Image (tube, rainbow, N blue to C red):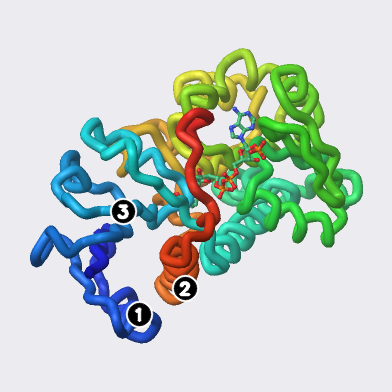
Amino acid sequence: MSILHKSDCTNEDPWRAAWAQQAPDRSLQVYPDLGEVETIRYALVWDPPAGLLASLPNLEVIFSIGAGIDHIAKDPERPKHLPVVRMVEDGLTAGMTEFVVLSVLWHHRDMAAYAVQQNSGLWQEIEPKLAKDRKVGFLGMGALAGAAAAKLCILGFRLHGWSRSPKQVPGVIMHHGEAGLAEVLGESEILVCLLPLTAATEGIMNRRTFAQLPEGAAFVNVGRGGLVVEEDLLAALNCGQVGSATLDVFRQEPLRAGSPFWSHPKVVVTPHIAAKTMAESAVASVMANIRRFEAGEAMLNVVDFERGY
Ligand code: NDP
Ligand code: OXD
């Protein structure tokens, strides 16, 4: 019995070490070395080439290295009868919390405007606000947004969140469904997008929805590039409807040379680094689920392909 590991890391050493330490009795195949394919029962993957998963005759569970599973869903040959488990692990959650708090504070304290001022040698104060007077909205209130919102709550921000199903989150005024979307947008001086990319969320931030934000709102996209109609975001930035943005994810990654986002004075671009899956805690999370699976118990965080995440 073996486990296939396929990531996009240039350095697999932390993964090899984590597997060796936490699953010493399991044999590990690190892609592209598949060894004897009949022995592979579990695969932990990021962006598997089309057909790879289908080529493993005794595969039982597909584990995603990412919280998002769009990189697996896009494989037309994905064996649809197999469960897919998305990644929920402490390292990824901690990293996302850091990045979201950083980004919200950046916009809250007008750092985009100060960067523009610095560029033209302008020494000028912008009237500050305290967190208690700042409204921050979240699209998506799952594992990652929930943890980030909890930290922002401690800082005193006024938080609104949007989910598919009704839910209660301490310190966050929650909204859901179509009507709830307009409500949360209208309350978001800073909007954090942490939705999965699904048929229902593709292009959700577009001309119509950007127009529903308060004028000059800041936009932080750490979900997926496909959630945003990029031309509409650019137009909203250029007319001031969106005052500033932090963009970590794009429709095309790496972001193409010449994209206007690279040099836009109101935009911070980062290369899909908001949160990284950390080998040690991720292997612990996968192994806990493998033990559940082998004991005949229900695994945690299994993807529901009907809803798309
Ligand atoms: P979860 O599945 O835990 O949460 C998803 C949230 O989105 C839930 O609150 C869910 O609602 C909500 N949602 C989904 N579809 C809809 C919809 N149609 N309408 C309203 N709400 C919806 O995901 P995670 O928090 O773990 O991850 C979120 C995403 O973050 C990932 O899918 C990935 O794309 C992205 N990500 C980006 C990273 C980066 O480095 N930039 C790193 C890691 C993840 P409900 O609560 O009702 O289910
Ligand atoms: C993820 C990601 O989905 O890294 O975890 O984007």
The mark that comes first in sequence, 2 or 1, is: 1
Decide if residue 133 is in sight here: yes
Mark 1, other Cα within 10 Å: few <14 / some 14–19 / many ≥20: some
Decide if residue 213 is in sight here: no
Mark 3, other Cα within 10 Å: few <14 / some 14–19 / many ≥20: some
Measure how far apart labels 2 and 1 are at the Cα level. 9 Å
Occupied quadrant, residue 82: top left
The mark that comes first in sequence, 3 or 2, is: 3
Residue at the extreme top of the image, as rendered: 208
Measure how far apart labels 3 and 2 are at the Cα level. 19 Å
> Is the C-beta of the residue carrying label 1 under 8 Å from the nearest atom of ligand 2?
no
Q: Which mark is residue 171?
A: none
Q: Secondary structure at mark 3?
A: loop
In front here: 207 or 59? 59
- Tag 1 residue: 23
Percent from the top left, x then y, of residue 201? 53, 26
Closer to viewer: mark 1 or mark 3: 3
Q: Residue at x 34, y 52 (%)?
A: 62
Measure how far apart labels 1 and 3 are at the Cα level. 17 Å
Amino acid bearing label 1: Ala
Q: Secondary structure at mark 1?
A: loop
The mark that comes first in sequence, 1 or 3, is: 1
- Tag 3 residue: 60
Residue at the extreme right of the image, as rendered: 132
